Amino acid sequence: MSTTQDEQGASPKELLIEASRRNNTDLLTEVFSTPPISSKPDLIAKFLNTTTDALGASALHIAAQYGSYEVLDTILDQEGVEIDGQERREGDTCLHKAVRFANEEGDKERGRAVVDILVDAGCDPRIRNKAKLKAIDLVDPRNTELRKDLQKAELTLQMSSDVVQEDEDDDARDGPGSESD
């Protein structure tokens, strides 16, 4: 994209949305490196966390919806990015969008890779959208591998929060004493 086109009205927000839709990491890098963001991590995170399209979808939602794996990878590398935000229309997280993409995509491996990168980044598969559906509820029943991956991610999160809860409960019951007396 030339500087002339930028001067004709493409805002950083519009460029971010376009980069996310088209899997254009060069454009994304350009948006991150030019004013007002100028490669400052805190400004990049704030820009990513507050910029949405007209339907309330963030760059992560859009990249997941279109299977823009490389853009997802770049965005997820930014410190301070909110990964579990919900868009306004359906209340979907980027993980919901990724599952919808995986259902539509002819290439199952590409769709699964988009879901996997989000799960690996820590997206919470337990979040429900406005229809009370988790991402796993949207998986095409024929896609058993994706279903297993999301079940595993959900179980892992549940187990990790149970461990933390048990530790807190143990401390509360033990009181100020020590067993090492």
Image (spheres, grey):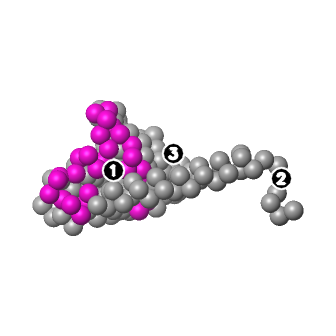
For marks 3 and 1, give the CA distance. Answer: 20 Å
- Camera-nearest residue between 153 and 42: 153
Residue found farthest to the bottom: 109
Q: Which residues are magenta?
A: 120-147
- Three-letter code, disc 3: Lys
Q: Is residue 125 left or right of residue 137?
A: right
Which of the marked residues, 3 or 2, is nearer the chain's N terminus? 3
Q: Is residue 31 magenta?
A: no
| Residue bearing mark 1 | 95
Q: Dot 3 lies on which element?
A: helix
Whole-percent x, y for residue 7 in the image = 35, 45
Residue at the image point whose x is 17% and y is 52% from the top: 140
For marks 2 and 1, give the CA distance. Answer: 45 Å
| Residue bearing mark 3 | 46
Q: Main secondary structure of the magenta part?
A: loop
| Residue bearing mark 2 | 177
- Three-letter code, disc 2: Gly
- Camera-nearest residue between 156 and 14: 156
- Camera-nearest residue between 170 and 122: 170
Q: Is residue 119 left or right of residue 166?
A: left
